[in-house]
Image: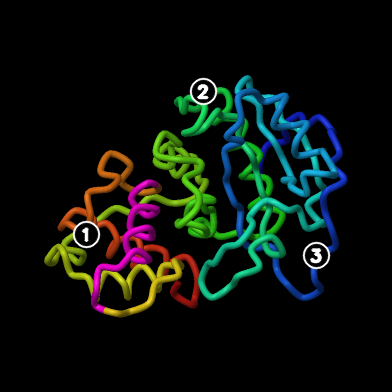
């Protein structure tokens, strides 16, 4: 059972009902992308802004609850994952305070990551969210979002049981720069990628989002052999989490 953590209430008016019959099966991770946490908190609670999240975590580890989990917060925007476009209806959104790429992107402090791990574990337990459904905002909207970015420590989180981290083996060996295979695997994993056999902008942004999440030290390297090996491993291992492969 996930450990309880202290949560401060800071209600946002920006939410609506969740549609009946739609499971909450995604935990979506964001950074705030604003100069200060206070500015982000105020914006997420401003009715004129029409944006929100279920939780916000300050850099000192303070956790704010903005929207009840049984309500639909407005955090994902236009997105896509595994055939679904209404990400808000099936997700819990967590904002981590960080200036982001526009205002001075920096590493996420350990105390903030620890608070996120504790919160995420509790959310996953409540809703039965599977490890491969803990996603970055940039995963569901790769053409327009970068958060939480390449400095977010997904590997450490996976070691805490939050999300997962692909570990390649001999089964995943093969050629690099295999565009058609990359498109098929990216689509199977969850990204919106059409199989054209051509390295088009849609494929490039999806590949970059995957690298930002799973190979941050090689973000932007293209479809080389390292990328292909880890992508094959991710698809293979994610499929093991459920009876229906991604």
Occupied quadrant, residue 169: bottom left
The residue indicated by pointer 2 is 109
Question: Can you tell which quarter of the image residue 11 is in?
Answer: top right
- Which image quadrant: the N terminus? top right
In the rendered image, which residue does mark 1 sit on?
223
According to the picture, the residue beneath numbered tag 3 turns out to be 18
Q: Bin the neighbour count of mark 1 within 10 Å (Cα to Cα): few under 14, some 14-19, many 20 and up.
A: many
User: Which of marks 1 and 3 precedes in the sequence?
Assistant: 3
Residue 90: x and y in percent read 68, 64
Q: Is residue 42 magenta?
A: no
Name the foreground residue: 207 vs 48: 48
Quadrant where the C terminus sits is: bottom left
- Which residue is at a point 19% across and 67% down the rendered structure image? 171
According to the image, what is the colour scheme of the structure? rainbow
Position of residue 99 relative to residue 81, above or below, is above
Closer to the eye: label 2 or 1: 1
Q: Position of residue 188 (x, y in %)?
A: 40, 73
Q: Is residue 204 inside the magenta stretch?
A: yes
x 68%, y 51%: residue: 75
2 or 1: tag closer to the N-terminus: 2
Residue 146 is situated, as x and y percent measured from the top left of the image, at: 47, 45
Alpha carbon distance from label 3 to label 2:
33 Å
User: Residue 177: x percent and y percent?
Assistant: 16, 64
100, 228: nearer the viewer: 100
Which segment did they paint magenta?
197-212
Residue 195, above or below 239: below
**Element carrying mark 3:** loop
Q: Is residue 114 left or right of residue 63?
A: left
Residue shown at the point (21%, 59%) measured from the top left: 223
């Amino acid at each position: 059972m996930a450990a309880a953590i202290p949560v401060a209430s800071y209600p946002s008016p920006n939410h609506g009902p969740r549609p009946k019959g739609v499971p909450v099966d995604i935990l979506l991770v964001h950074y705030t992308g604003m100069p200060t946490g206070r500015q982000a908190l105020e914006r997420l609670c401003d009715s004129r802004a029409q944006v929100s999240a279920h939780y916000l975590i300050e850099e000192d580890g303070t956790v704010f609850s903005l929207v009840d989990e049984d309500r639909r917060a407005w955090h994902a925007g236009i997105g896509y994952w595994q055939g679904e476009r209404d990400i808000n209806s099936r997700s819990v959104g967590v904002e981590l305070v960080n200036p982001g790429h526009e205002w001075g992107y920096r590493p996420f402090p350990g105390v903030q990551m620890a608070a996120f791990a504790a919160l995420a574990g509790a959310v996953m337990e409540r809703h039965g969210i599977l490890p491969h459904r803990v996603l970055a905002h940039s995963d569901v909207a790769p053409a327009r979002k970068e958060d939480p970015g390449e400095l977010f420590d997904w590997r450490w989180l996976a070691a805490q049981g939050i999300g997962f981290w692909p570990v390649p083996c001999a089964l995943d060996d093969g050629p690099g720069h295999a565009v058609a295979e990359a498109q098929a695997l990216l689509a199977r994993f969850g990204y919106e990628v059409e199989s054209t056999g051509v390295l088009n902008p849609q494929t490039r942004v999806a590949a970059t989002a995957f690298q930002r999440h799973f190979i941050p030290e090689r973000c932007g390297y293209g479809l080389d052999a390292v990328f292909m090996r880890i992508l094959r491993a991710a698809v293979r291992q994610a499929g093991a989490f459920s009876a229906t492969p991604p």
